[in-house]
Amino acid sequence: MEDNLAIILNESNKTISKLQLLSAFFEEEIIYKIYLRSQVVHKLFETNPELDINKLELFHLQYTASAIELLKKIKSANERNVSLIYDEIQLNREMMEKLNSSVFSEKNYTLDKQKQALKINLSLRRLYQTLSDNTDEYPFSKNINAFSSRFSQDFYYDITADQMSALITYEPDDVYKNSHATIQKKLMGLLCKTDFKTEFFCGLKSGNMIAEVYRFLTLDRQFLFLPSRNLFLLCDLSAITDIDWSNTLSKKAKLTQEMADKNDQLESKANLIKTALPDHVKALLHEYYDKISDVDFLQKIGSFDVQTNILRTMLNTDGL
């Protein structure tokens, strides 16, 4: 008899430990209350040997074991859903790593912008000299077009064909022209006035047409360079209202940031899904708790009427 008592109490402790683990996993108040109530029932039989110990075993069979089965089933379903989310997070991380290693970095772009501006300033100074001297010397620095070839795909702003056309349209009488380049007269005057000191501002792209935009260091003016035509014209970007000129991130950097933000959202979603309990399950667990908290509960253990049937039936776990 004592052996049977010890065995049932030992098994009861194991069952309650499983419920405790599930309570810690879900962090749901009703599960913790069920766990505490189960401990109370266990303690009641442990400290009152005159009670029928078989009723403790029957209590766990009818209630606790079924509740544990239900919660484990929900836990497994949640973890499967969370696993899919973490698979997506990992794929995003791998894509971010590829983006960071496969194209030119922000640092490359920043450094090469400065080099390109020096090349353009030197080329414009030479162009001024060749136009002044009426010579046919080639004015452009070596590899002047390499910068746009390297960075236009990822770093240049996309504009429409009409917007690009408006920027590169000019009157023939308003430009100086030789066999190597065409430059707006007013632009050349401003360059001479500012000693050819400009910096790269941004790049523009429309289809296969590419333009580099520069701004004066001492004037609030900008001009563009069209590499395909060696064309230099003053420009006004204020007419292009659908671009945020302050956003200097590359397409790669923007995509990487978007994917990082998406991963943060997925992480939060995974944390919520991992311990989520459907509302109808919470309601049934509350009903279960009310039953085992009933003052006449001990007298009802073993009764298989509708109100005290096995929890699996009450919760209909097969429908989860």
Image: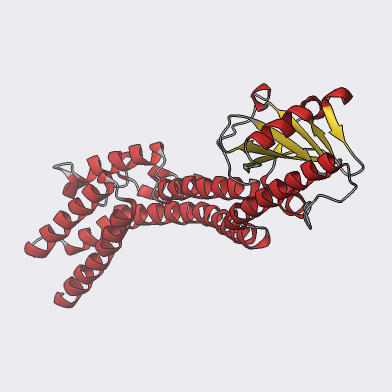
**269 sits left or right of 148 in the view:** left
Residue 89: image quadrant is bottom right
Residue 179: image quadrant is top right
The one nearer the camera, 314 or 257, is 257
Q: Residue furthest bottom?
A: 3
Report the label total. 0
Q: Looking at the image, is 106 positioned above or below residue 206? A: below
The one nearer the camera, 156 or 61, is 156
The one nearer the camera, 173 or 67, is 173
Q: Position of residue 41 (x, y in %)?
A: 16, 55
Identity of the residue drawn at 77% across and 41% down: 128
Identity of the residue drawn at 42% across and 51% down: 274
Q: Position of residue 275 (x, y in %)?
A: 39, 49
The one nearer the camera, 21 or 257, is 257
Q: Position of residue 281 (x, y in %)?
A: 38, 41
Residue 208 visible: no
Identity of the residue drawn at 47% across and 48% down: 264
Identity of the residue drawn at 18% across and 44% down: 293
Q: Position of residue 207 (x, y in %)?
A: 82, 38
The colour mode here is secondary structure
Residue 264 visible: yes
Q: Quadrant of the N terminus?
A: bottom left
Q: Looking at the image, is 115 positioned above or below residue 193? A: below
Q: Residue furthest front?
A: 133
